[in-house]
Image (cartoon, grey):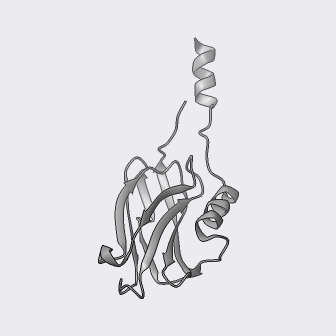
């Protein structure tokens, strides 16, 4: 039994990598490079507990038929999967923003990318320090 407990304590959680993050972002953008700016990523830079971290994303856009945000995606580099959420939007949305709570496996970089109606992509990123990790499965 002691061997089993030791084995469980040595198991590391599966995690995304910076390479997986880049691949997920390329898939979302179709290979286009997102430009910085126009996107606000609101997440605390220091998180005590990674189990329920509030995060918000807002994109500057008039949200008209001619000029709107088509989608917002949130990516991370160290959780089990690199794509946290993708929200589809349109002019009917009224505002280009989303908020939710996510789990963070450990300290890591988060990136929000917005797909705009003109075919361009905008982004914001933030490093988050997590003192008590989440997403650990044995």
Q: Farthest residue in the top direction?
A: 1
Compared with 12, 94 (above or below) is: below
Residue 63 in which image quadrant? bottom left
Q: Is residue 99 left or right of residue 20?
A: left
For residue 131, above or below residue 128: above
Residue in the foreground of this view, choosing between 23 and 79: 23
Residue lying farthest to the right in this orientation: 19
Q: In the figure, 4 relative to 105: above or below?
A: above
Quarter of the rendering occupied by the C terminus: top right
* Residue 96 locus on image (x, y percent): 36, 75
In the image, residue 29 lies at what x, y percent?
60, 71
Residue 90 in the image: x percent, y percent?
A: 38, 74
Taking the spot 42% from the left edge, 87% from the top edge, the residue there is 67
Picture quarter containing residue 1?
top right
Q: Residue at x 63, y 16 (%)?
A: 3
Percent of width and height locating residue 116? 49, 80
Residue drawn at 54 percent across, 56 percent down = 83
Looking at the rendered structure, the number of numbered marks drawn on it comes to 0
Q: Nearer the viewer, residue 68 or 7?
A: 68
Residue 15 placement, left or right of 137? right
Residue 94, quarter of picture: bottom left
Q: Residue furthest front?
A: 65
């Amino acid at each position: 039994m002691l061997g089993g407990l030791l084995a469980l304590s040595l198991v590391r959680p599966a995690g995304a990598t910076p390479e997986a993050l880049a691949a997920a972002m390329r898939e979302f953008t179709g290979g286009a490079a997102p430009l910085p700016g126009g996107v606000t990523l609101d997440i605390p830079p220091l998180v005590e507990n990674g189990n329920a971290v509030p995060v918000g994303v807002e994109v500057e856009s008039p949200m008209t038929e001619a000029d709107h945000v088509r989608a917002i995606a949130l990516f991370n580099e160290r959780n089990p999967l690199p794509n946290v959420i993708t929200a589809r939007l349109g002019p009917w949305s009224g505002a280009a923003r989303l908020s939710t709570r996510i789990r963070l496996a450990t300290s890591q970089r988060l990136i929000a990318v917005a797909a705009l109606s003109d075919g361009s992509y905008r982004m914001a990123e933030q490093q988050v320090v997590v003192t008590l990790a989440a997403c650990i499965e044995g």
